[in-house]
Image (cartoon, coloured by chain):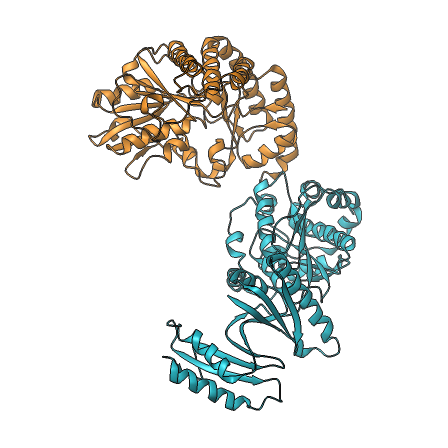
Chain colours: A orange, B cyan
Amino acid sequence: MFYFDHAASTPINREAYDILCKSLELDFANPASKHKLGTDLSKKIQRAREDILFALNLTDSNILFTSSATESNNHVIKNYSKLGRVLYYKMDHPSVTNSVDDKGVGLKLKDNLADFLDDSICLVVLTLVNPQSGLVIDIESLAKQVKDFNPKIRVLVDAAQAIGKIDFDFSKNSQLFDYINIAGHKIGGPRGIACLVYKKNDKTLAPLLEGGGHEDGLRSSTPSTALILSLSCALVLAVKNIKQQTAKVSLQRLKLEECLLNAHPNISLPFKEQSTSPYIIAVLFKGIPSDVILRHLEMKKVFVSSTTACSSKIKGYNPMLDALGIEEMYHKNILRVSLGFSTTEEDIVGFIHAFNQVINEIKFLIKK
Amino acid sequence: MFTTIIINVDELWLKGKNRKTYSDALRKHVRDILSSYLETKWTIRNDQQRFVCDCAEGFNDAVIARLCDIPGLHSVLKVRKCEKDLDKAVNLVLADLKLRTDISTFKVQSKRVDKSFPTQSRELNLHFGGAILKNTHLKVDVHNPDIIVEVKILNEHIYLSWEKHYGIGGLPVNTSGHVVTLISGGFDSPVASYLMSRRGCKQTFAFFYAYPYVGEEVKEKIVKMCQILAKFQNGAKLYVLPFGNIQNFISTECYEEYRTLFFRKYMMDVSSKLADKIKGEAILMGDSLAQVSSQTLHNMAALDKSCDKLVLRPLLGNNKLDIIALSKKIGTHDTSIIPHDDACALFAPKHPITKPKMEYFNKFMEKFPCTELIEECIENAEVFSFNNRLMVKDNKFTKN
């Protein structure tokens, strides 16, 4: 099997897996319990929180553990929607675009953010690495524009595709970013756990779920010790290995890009000239729907994505691709090939071999 | 809840000595439906060419609705059963009608099946009509009444009913042979299937699955569609036939403009082989004359000349809007409009042939009989079975 859908979900790494299994077996107590078993787990969770903040060099912030990056985005956006309007980009993940209410302001990539700022805006959502195209967005300059206009406007950064994958230092201008969203299963951690980094003095976030008042009253639900410890391990490792991983993946990406461009003249890489994450390649194949390529590759045990996994049911017009500047006639022709920490040389060779075979098999479908 | 229902058989009056065959087939279907829906004891008996069903727990609306889907069934009457005493019968009618504030007019229709009963039909009408007029708010309207109160004097009881549910009529399933029905995701083939169910055809559904050119969601849609069509069958099977390889082969070997025609040709060949396997006599398709280029008279003539089975095309003379209207009526419309990938559109030639050159057509078939690919297609079919509760019973790969 050759897996190239790491941007959707990537395999859990060995260390995170071991911690997960061990903790699932041993850490059965409720971390909110008053007895020693409970308080010990509560301390472990606290340490995990600190480890993550230390790895990100954001020790002045706090962490809210959630079940997914989707939940984290919803948590922030739904809270701010009550206070005013939310500004976001239409090419963001559906957990952003679908949780914004009717008052929200949706921008396209080419839009000038400053033109849309006004007094009614209370939150701006920025995505550091676009999940569909891999584009690295200059969130620093955008956040600066926001804060220059009105420092009271809060900035949420969806960093699900970025943490541990591109070298971005949130601590450098940490006052620009009020919330940072991180997902476990994109960085070699388990699914079902994510975390939201927020400022210690934050007074705006209110809980979505009421109950026992866990997570400083922000999310009532018995915390999953095992998932939290495993996420922390994966994140710390990802951040630690970033340089070495980026170097490896960048080389692999070059090989893939060369193969893709040589496979057929109708193939192009629409974002190649822009700054992109080495982990995501968006491929445009004029004349053949990406779903057809996806399934042909699947038959050869190669797994890619046709649009981001959450929106792949959409047929035809795709608002994410539209916002990225892709013409509507090509919305069904975009394939996403995404690499991960565990991608090997054999994977690359396997992909190249299968891809060339598939293109040979189906090129007759291209209408002249 | 009504504890008795009477089931009227459609078109039985057209039949002669073979009447019992049709009546028995319908009775079997009714029995099968009742067995799968009723959990308590129930009975069915013939009474003057009708079926009378009794169930102490009563027949709920869901069961009645399912009965109305049975081909060959004219109507289901919800009945109050009464001993042969006119006063008691009148009181039963009044008790129910007094509560009906939703209606304002009525008409009485009496039938004296037991000719030894002293009161004649006309007198019965007057007797019941007078009592209703006197004791309820209802007025008589013989032309367009809100309800018709039916009084039937049978051999042992008086049956009273004012709720009649019409079925789809036609002939009972399994009395007109077994056909292989080609199902696609559109409007036409499900409607064609319904029409032939109504004419008593047992059907085995065949779907040509063009994976990897189309995705799993198309298969899910077809399973859903056949679940609806199985309402008009007494249990049915769906063969999902992997067709991607054959399409690939045809596309590389034939002239581009002949692609769609040859896809159909080999679909019919596979269907014919499947018909042999399941002992079917014909192939059923949803073509409407000249609706699309592959449905021209010339193309259909070419295809039928090379097919060894009778091909039924009940929609040939229907307009698209009529077909869509019927699909709404039979409940397939909302499934038909679910968007899905279409392999035909993907392979569609720029200029599809409408008048094939028979020399090329015949030569191609002679050169490429595709016997192995066709066998493979049937052998690797995924088979789904639908029972009378319309549940998918199994969907494992069968190597037959």
- The answer to whether residue A204 is visible is yes
> What residue appears at the point 36 percent right and 23 percent down from the top-left corner?
A214
Residue A57: name its quadrant: top left
Left or right position of A251 against B294: left
Q: Which quarter of the figure is the C terminus of chain B placed in?
A: top right
| Number of marks in the rendered image | 0
- Choose between A193 and A261: the one closer to the eye: A193
Q: Is residue B143 above or below residue B167?
A: below
Name the spot of residue A330 as percent of width and height, x first.
Answer: 48, 36
Left or right position of A107 against A252: left
- Choose between A299 and A153: the one closer to the eye: A153
Name the spot of residue A166 as percent of width and height, x first.
Answer: 43, 15
Name the spot of residue B104 as percent of width and height, x first.
Answer: 38, 77
- The answer to whether residue B189 is visible is no
Name the spot of residue B70 as percent of width and height, x first.
Answer: 61, 64
Q: Is residue A214 above or below residue B211?
A: above
> What residue appears at the point 65 percent right and 23 percent down from the top-left corner?
A353
Q: Is residue B124 above or below residue B149?
A: below
Q: Is residue A210 above or below residue B388?
A: above
> What residue appears at the point 56 percent right and 79 percent down from the top-left corner?
B83
